[in-house]
Image (tube, rainbow, N blue to C red):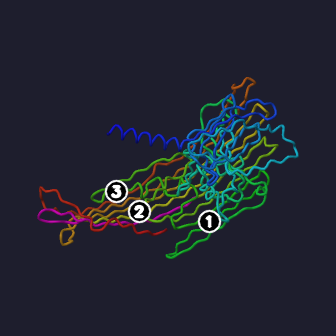
């Protein structure tokens, strides 16, 4: 009986799986020569939601097979660099494979010049690049590129501005193929408006060296390229947001972009005391990497453990404020880029300024119970931190000829951090009379400045993959030893002696009191 039941269940599972797993197959043929078309991308895109379901490449005989296809309505799209796109609606039925026979594709060179091919597909696959047509995804008026990206299937943006595309973290966002605000992708997607974008391309970018030599070194970085609409490449695009609330809270932002051909100028500014600390994910939920609240750990008995860290020479401070206190922030940035001399010369420069301060207060009361007595522990702590920082970088890249290039780069950072922490730990008897008190105060100050300049000359030889490179760089860093002072005071009376381990009961949890400034 059990064997028969198992056999029936297996047959049912097989039938259900077969019903949900159709196959779509076919052959790609050049309409003019009759030759088979290999290495073309054949993709299935949902007609209802424009989500990419699956894609394959045609083999050397032009054959393709899409397996595991559910019964639904899809757009079947064939893409190849040398051929015009082929698009057809397909509706596979449950339990039936779909054979499309020969699909004839036309070479782009054979298309008449007066024929205009219009393609309105929301998503296209071109080689290793996934391309999203911006106007196919509706956003509210005045929305940013960040809001637009959230509409794209396969791309996510978390609350801190971190971008993930096809399961990989995006490390660069380009505008018309050029860097925009250096290496902070979140600044770019917040600073540009969605209605200025024609399409967004997602791809794995090769290293600069691999692109120059033509030899793949295996290095890749997930990159988005924002292609501007032609009519948006001139004029001014801007956005101003002003907000205010109770308890003198405010949050103001302004962003402006100036375009003239290949010349781009961008400015942004932020003033806030509501927790918004910047445009980029590298500092949105973070605050100061030196002697600050996140590094001032209050240990049992009121002791404070201080530590510091380094986040890299030219990165933002690590700025975590652990939701205690609300930072008062001023941040501004500027960008300039241009292409000159028939695109043989590239100029790119960025500058950012940031000034933040926070005051955090916390307290707790804990009761410890013994078999014959009890006592209390009361903790109060206060942490004040402030920082200011200037970051700047620039690039001048010129192609000397078709085989040689010369690149000048510079980076700089100047920063100051100050911190004050204090803690008061009191032990009280059952009547809340003072038994022991421990107070500690610590203050610190840190200066940090880094400057780096480099010159890179590269010469590509006639034999593919052969190059000669010369790189000269100079770096100077001034980081005086951080100074600080400590004040500690103790007043002690003996606790009742016992061999029993006390049990603790938190009467009031640590309650942060948020104050700005």
Percent across and percent down for residue 274 are: 51, 67
Residue 237 location (% of width, % of height): 72, 62
Disc 1 to disc 3, C-alpha distance? 37 Å
Instruction: Decide: is 40 above or below 378.
Output: above
> Which residue appears at 18% of the width and 59% of the height?
502
Q: Is residue 360 magenta?
A: yes
What residue span does the magenta drawing correspond to?
354-376
Q: Is residue 285 above or below residue 42?
A: below
Q: Which mark is residue 253?
A: 1
Residue 278 falls in which quadrant of the image? bottom right
Q: Callout 3: helix, strand or loop?
A: strand
Give the mark, 3 or 2, whose residue is nearer the N terminus.
3
CA–CA distance between discs 2 and 1? 28 Å
For marks 1 and 3, the one nearer the N-term is 1
Foreground residue among 402 and 47: 47
Query: Quick one: which residue is furthest to the top in this view?
Result: 463
Estimate the x, y position of residue 307 in percent, counting from the top left: 40, 51
Element type at marker 1? strand
Q: CA distance from mark 3 to mark 2?
A: 11 Å
Image quadrant occupied by the N terminus:
top left
Q: Which residue matches tag 2?
A: 383
Q: Residue at x 70, y 46 (%)?
A: 88
Q: Is residue 86 left or right of residue 66?
A: right
Residue furthest to the right in view is 114
**In the image, residue 122 lies in the stretch drawn in magenta:** no
Residue at the spot of label 3: 304
Q: Position of residue 435 (x, y in %)?
A: 20, 66
């Amino acid at each position: 009986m059990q064997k028969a039941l198992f056999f029936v269940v297996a047959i049912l599972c097989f039938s259900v799986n077969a019903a949900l797993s159709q196959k779509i197959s076919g052959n790609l043929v050049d309409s003019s020569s009759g030759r088979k078309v290999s290495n073309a991308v054949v993709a299935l895109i949902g007609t209802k939601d424009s989500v990419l379901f699956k894609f394959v490449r045609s083999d050397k005989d032009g054959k393709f097979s899409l397996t595991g296809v559910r019964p639904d309505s899809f757009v079947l799209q064939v893409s190849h660099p040398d051929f015009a796109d082929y698009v057809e609606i397909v509706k596979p039925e449950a339990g039936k494979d779909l054979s499309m026979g020969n699909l004839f594709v036309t070479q782009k060179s054979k298309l008449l010049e007066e024929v205009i091919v219009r393609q309105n597909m929301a998503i296209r696959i071109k080689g290793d690049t996934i391309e999203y047509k911006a106007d196919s995804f509706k956003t509210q008026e005045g929305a940013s590129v960040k809001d637009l990206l959230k509409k794209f299937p396969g791309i996510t943006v978390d609350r801190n501005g971190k971008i993930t595309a096809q399961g990989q973290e995006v490390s660069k966002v380009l505008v018309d193929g050029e860097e925009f605000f250096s290496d902070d992708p979140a600044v770019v997607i917040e600073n540009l408006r969605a209605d200025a974008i024609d399409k967004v391309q997602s791809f794995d970018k090769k290293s600069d060296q691999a692109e120059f030599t033509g030899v793949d070194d295996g290095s890749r970085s997930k990159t988005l390229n924002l292609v501007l609409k032609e009519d948006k490449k001139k004029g001014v695009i801007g956005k101003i947001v002003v907000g205010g609330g109770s308890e003198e809270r405010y949050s103001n932002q302004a962003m402006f972009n100036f375009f003239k051909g290949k010349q781009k100028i961008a400015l942004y500014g932020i003033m806030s005391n509501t927790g918004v600390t910047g445009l980029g994910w590298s500092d949105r939920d973070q605050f100061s990497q030196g002697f600050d609240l996140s590094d001032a750990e209050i240990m049992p008995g009121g002791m404070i453990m201080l530590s510091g860290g380094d986040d890299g020479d030219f990165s933002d401070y690590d700025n975590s404020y652990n939701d205690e206190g609300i930072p008062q922030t001023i941040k501004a940035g500027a960008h300039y880029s241009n292409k000159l001399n028939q695109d043989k010369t590239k100029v790119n420069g960025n500058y950012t300024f940031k000034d933040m301060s926070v005051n955090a207060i916390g307290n707790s009361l804990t009761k410890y119970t013994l078999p014959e007595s009890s006592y209390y522990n009361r903790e109060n702590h206060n942490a004040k931190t402030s920082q200011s920082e200037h970051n700047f970088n620039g690039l001048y890249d010129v192609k000397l000829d078709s085989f040689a290039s010369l690149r000048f780069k510079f980076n700089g950072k100047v920063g100051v951090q100050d911190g004050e922490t204090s803690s008061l730990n009191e032990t009280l008897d059952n009547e809340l009379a003072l038994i022991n008190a421990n107070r500690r105060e610590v203050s610190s100050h840190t200066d940090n400045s880094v400057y780096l300049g480099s010159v890179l000359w590269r010469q590509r030889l006639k034999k593919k993959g052969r190059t000669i490179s010369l790189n000269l760089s100079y770096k100077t860093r001034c980081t005086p030893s951080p100074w600080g002072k400590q004040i500690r005071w103790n007043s002690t009376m003996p606790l009742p002696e016992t061999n029993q381990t006390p049990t603790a009961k938190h009467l009031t949890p640590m309650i942060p009191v948020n104050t700005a400034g």
